[in-house]
Image (spheres, rainbow, N blue to C red):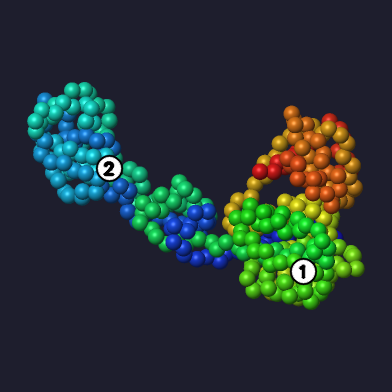
C-alpha cells in the first residue's frame, strides 16, 4: 500500500510529447508545441484608423482632393502638402501623410476639403504597431483559443505545430453490468473530456481473464492511456491485478485513502493503465485526486485547484494513517458532508467540493475551519 503523496509523485513523472502539424481551422483548443515568432510587422503598412482624409499637416485652410484609397488597395500613392486623399478604415495611407482627418471633421467643397474641427489623434496605425517583426507572439504550451488564433492568422500561418491529444481507452468490468446501469464509464468519460484528452469507450468486459486481456489489447492498439473500473479489489473475481501483472507490471496497488483504497496503477507495453475501484464514489474520488491532474499533464494543459475556507457543520471521523476525502455541500460559508457510502453516487453527485483529512490527522470537528477543493 502506498501513500497519496507518493502515488502523486509517481504519476507526475509521466509525460506525453507527441506532436503534429495541423490546419489552423482544426487548431482550436490545441496546445502549441512550438513558439510562434512573427515573420513580419503587423500591419506591414501605415493604415487608416478612420474613414477620412489623409493629409501631410493640419495647418492649411484648404486641401485638394486627388484620389481615394479603399481597403485592399496597395498602391504607393504620394501626396503633397496641400493635397489630401480619401481613405477608408483599414486602407493604406499615402506616403508622406501624417494625419487622417475623420470625415465628420471636414467640410467638402467640390474637390476641396476644409478642416472645421480640431483633431487630437493622428488616426494612423503605424507599421508594427500591432505586432513587430521577430517578436515572440505565442509561446509553446499556450492553448489556442478564439482570441489568439487571430494572431496566428494575421501572420499567414496555415499549419501549426501542436501536441497530439492523448487517446484514453475506457473499459468497464463486471458480470453485473448486463443487469445494472454502467455508471463509471460515463463518469470517467466525462473526466477524460474535462482533461482535454480524447475518451474512447472500448467496451464492457466480463469477470473473465481472457475477456479482460482481449479488451485491454484492443485499447493498446488505439490508445495512449487505459482506464478500467471494477475488478481491482480482493474479491474472487477481481482479476485485474493478475491481468496487469501478466501483461505488464504493477507500479502500485492500493492507496492509503478512503474512499478509493483499491486503486491500481501500472504499465502495459509502456502505456499507463489505471484500474479504478468499482464503487462509484470511490471511482470518481480517485479520478479527481489522481486521474484528472495526470491526464491534464499529458495533455499539456494546466491543472489548478480552487480552494475556499468553510466551517464544518458536523464532526467528520477519520482513520490515522489513511487520507480521507469527504464530499461536502457549501452554503453560506458552511460545509455540509454529503458522503453516505462509497457505493452511492449521491454521496458526491450533489457535492460542491472535497475536503481532505491527511494521514496524520484523525478527526475534523464541528465548527473547524477546513479547506474545500471546489469542483469547477
**Mark 2 touches mark 1? (CB < 8 Å):** no
Q: Residue at x 69, y 67 (%)?
A: 202
Q: Residue at x 35, y 44 (%)?
A: 130
Relative to 46, residue 231 above or below: below
- Mark drawn on residue 90: 2
Quadrant for residue 158, please give it: bottom left
Picture coordinates of residue 233 (x, y %)? 86, 63
On the rendered image, what quadrant is the N terminus found in? bottom right
Picture coordinates of residue 24 (x, y %)? 43, 58
Picture coordinates of residue 107 (x, y %)? 16, 26
Residue at the front extreme of this rendering: 179
On the rendered image, what quadrant is the C terminus found in? top right
Do we see residue 264 in this rendering? no
Q: Which residue is mark 1?
A: 205
Chain-order first, disc 2 or disc 1? 2
Could you tell me how far apart the alpha carbons at marks 2 and 1 are, in whole angstroms? 62 Å
- Mark drawn on residue 25: none
Q: Residues within 10 Å of mark 1 (few under 14, many from 20)?
A: many
Quadrant for residue 250, please give it: bottom right
> Could you say whether the residue bearing mark 2 is in a helix, strand or loop?
loop
Relative to 53, residue 161 above or below: below
57 with respect to 220 (left or right):
left
Q: Residue at x 76, y 41 (%)?
A: 351
Amino acid at each position: 500500500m502506498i501513500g497519496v503523496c507518493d502515488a502523486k509523485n509517481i504519476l507526475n513523472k509521466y509525460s506525453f510529447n507527441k506532436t503534429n502539424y495541423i490546419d489552423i481551422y482544426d487548431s482550436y483548443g490545441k496546445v502549441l508545441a512550438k513558439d510562434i515568432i512573427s515573420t513580419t510587422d503587423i500591419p506591414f503598412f501605415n493604415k487608416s484608423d478612420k474613414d477620412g482624409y489623409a493629409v501631410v499637416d493640419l495647418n492649411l485652410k484648404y486641401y485638394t482632393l486627388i484620389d481615394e484609397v479603399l481597403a485592399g488597395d496597395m498602391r504607393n500613392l504620394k501626396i503633397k502638402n496641400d493635397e489630401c486623399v480619401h481613405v477608408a478604415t483599414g486602407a493604406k495611407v499615402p506616403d508622406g501623410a501624417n494625419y487622417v482627418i475623420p470625415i465628420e471633421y471636414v467640410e467638402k467643397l467640390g474637390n476641396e476639403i476644409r478642416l472645421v474641427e480640431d483633431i487630437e489623434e493622428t488616426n494612423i496605425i503605424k507599421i508594427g504597431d500591432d505586432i513587430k517583426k521577430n517578436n515572440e507572439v505565442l509561446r509553446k504550451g499556450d492553448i489556442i483559443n478564439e482570441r489568439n488564433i487571430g494572431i496566428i492568422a494575421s501572420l499567414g500561418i496555415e499549419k501549426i505545430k501542436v501536441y497530439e491529444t492523448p487517446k484514453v481507452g475506457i473499459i468497464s468490468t463486471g458480470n453485473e453490468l448486463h443487469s445494472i446501469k454502467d455508471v463509471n464509464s460515463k463518469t470517467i468519460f466525462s473526466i477524460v473530456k474535462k482533461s482535454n484528452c480524447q475518451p474512447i469507450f472500448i467496451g464492457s468486459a466480463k469477470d473473465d481473464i481472457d475477456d479482460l486481456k482481449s479488451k485491454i489489447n484492443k485499447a493498446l492498439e488505439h490508445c495512449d492511456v487505459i482506464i478500467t473500473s471494477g475488478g481491482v479489489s480482493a474479491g474472487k473475481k477481481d482479476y485485474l491485478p493478475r491481468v496487469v501483472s501478466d501483461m505488464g507490471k504493477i507500479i502500485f496497488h492500493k492507496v492509503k485513502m478512503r474512499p478509493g483504497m483499491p486503486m491500481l496503477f501500472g504499465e502495459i507495453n509502456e502505456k499507463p493503465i489505471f484500474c479504478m475501484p468499482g464503487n462509484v464514489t470511490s471511482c470518481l474520488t480517485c479520478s479527481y485526486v489522481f486521474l484528472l491532474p495526470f491526464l491534464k499533464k499529458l495533455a499539456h494543459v494546466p491543472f489548478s485547484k480552487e480552494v475556499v475556507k468553510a466551517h464544518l457543520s458536523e464532526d467528520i471521523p477519520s482513520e490515522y494513517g489513511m487520507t480521507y476525502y469527504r464530499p461536502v455541500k457549501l452554503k453560506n460559508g458552511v460545509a455540509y458532508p454529503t458522503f453516505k457510502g462509497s457505493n452511492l453516487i449521491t454521496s458526491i453527485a450533489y457535492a460542491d467540493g472535497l475536503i481532505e483529512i491527511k494521514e496524520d490527522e484523525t478527526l475534523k470537528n464541528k465548527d473547524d475551519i477546513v479547506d474545500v477543493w471546489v469542483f469547477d
